[in-house]
Image (cartoon, rainbow, N blue to C red):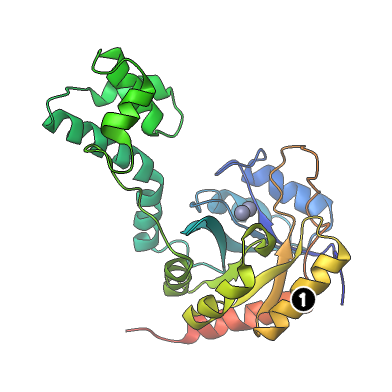
């Protein structure tokens, strides 16, 4: 078993989500570091992929595959799901991803509408001004209520209107791991359970995810020590999952971050994934 093979890295971020390198810069870094097989997996977006492929075309030694990372909610914890070999140009997929990204704004707008219906007049533009470019959340709506003098504190805004059982509360659109797996499969991708140690009781969840069509899980991840890699490798084998992985590189230069190509599965794993992806693409769906 190879730990930290430097030639395959299937978990990478760019400025298209929360990474600090542009897709071009990341590809150049991968080439410099001798990575031969890589997947760019930005959060909820594939916007960086076209630019990355354009750059990768100049470097024949690098094989780049399209990927994504989706966030899912489970009671009390979170699951991140990678989609590898995604048919990312599919317009329906793009519509769905745009909806995820707009989800937070929609939720804020819904709350403003509910408050207006209750007689508390707010302007959406005020909420946006208060958020000042950040992803809009309930605190921004609470501050807008305060600004208008409807409440004297944000706490009061939550207590009277915005709390879970409040009259102006709106649900965030949530996706379960099973839904994420179905979505990834629908767009010809291979679903891979990301950094399983971040999820509580991961073992118990895996059976359910396997039934939904989970293909792999991350085993060779970032700076997982050999004993963790060994444990995850056995867990993957138990569930018949492909042992994947990568560095989850963001370019943040934070403590604990490792350079692209310092963690990843052996090349045989990439070959196996490619075979599975090709088989999926050759199946004609109605
Ligand atoms: Zn993640
Ligand atoms: Zn990630």
Is residue 76 positioned above or below 213 on the image?
Answer: above
* For residue 69, side relative to residue 109 (left or right): right
Mark 1 is surrounded, within 10 Å at the Cα level, by few (under 14), some (14 to 19) or many (20 or more) other residues, namely: many
Question: Ligand 1 closer than 8 Å to the CB at disc 1?
Answer: no
- Which one is in front, 18 or 123? 123
Residue in view at x 21 percent, y 38 percent:
167
Percent x, y for residue 117?
Answer: 12, 32
Q: Check disc 1 and report its element: helix, strand or loop.
A: helix
Image position, residue 227 (x, y; %): 86, 68
**Does residue 224 appear in the picture of this structure?**
yes
Q: Position of residue 276 (x, y in %)?
A: 60, 82
The image quadrant of residue 265 is bottom right
Q: Could you tell whether 113 is left or right of 224 in the image?
A: left
Residue 152, above or below 55: above
Quarter containing the N terminus? bottom right
Q: Residue at x 49, y 51 (%)?
A: 45
């Amino acid at each position: 078993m190879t730990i930290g093979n430097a030639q395959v890295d299937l978990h990478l971020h760019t400025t298209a989500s929360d990474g600090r390198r542009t897709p071009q810069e990341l590809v150049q870094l991968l080439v410099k570091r001798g990575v031969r097989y890589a997947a760019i997996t930005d959060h909820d977006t594939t916007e960086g992929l076209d630019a990355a492929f354009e750059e990768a075309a100049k470097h024949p030694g690098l094989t780049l595959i399209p990927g994504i990372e989706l966030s899912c909610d489970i009671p009390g914890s979170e699951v991140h799901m990678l989609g590898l070999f995604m048919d990312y140009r599919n317009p329906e997929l793009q519509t769905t991803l745009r909806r995820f990204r707009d989800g937070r704004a929609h939720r804020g707008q819904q709350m403003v509408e509910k408050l207006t219906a209750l007689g508390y007049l707010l302007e959406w533009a005020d909420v946006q001004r208060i958020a000042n470019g950040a992803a809009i959340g309930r605190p921004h709506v609470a501050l807008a209520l305060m600004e208008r003098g409807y409440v004297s504190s944000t706490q009061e805004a939550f207590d009277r209107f915005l709390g879970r059982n409040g009259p102006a509360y709106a649900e965030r659109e949530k996706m379960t791991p099973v839904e994420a797996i179905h979505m990834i499969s629908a767009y010809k991708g291979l679903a891979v359970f990301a950094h399983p140690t971040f999820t509580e009781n991961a073992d118990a969840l895996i059976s359910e995810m396997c039934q939904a069509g989970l293909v792999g899980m991350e085993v060779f991840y970032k700076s997982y020590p050999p004993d963790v890699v060994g444990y995850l490798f056995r867990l993957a084998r138990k569930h018949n999952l492909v042992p994947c992985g990568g560095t989850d590189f963001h370019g943040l230069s934070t403590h604990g971050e490792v350079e692209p190509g310092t963690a990843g599965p052996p090349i045989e794993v990439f070959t196996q994934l490619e075979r599975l992806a090709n088989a999926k693409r050759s199946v004609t769906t109605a």
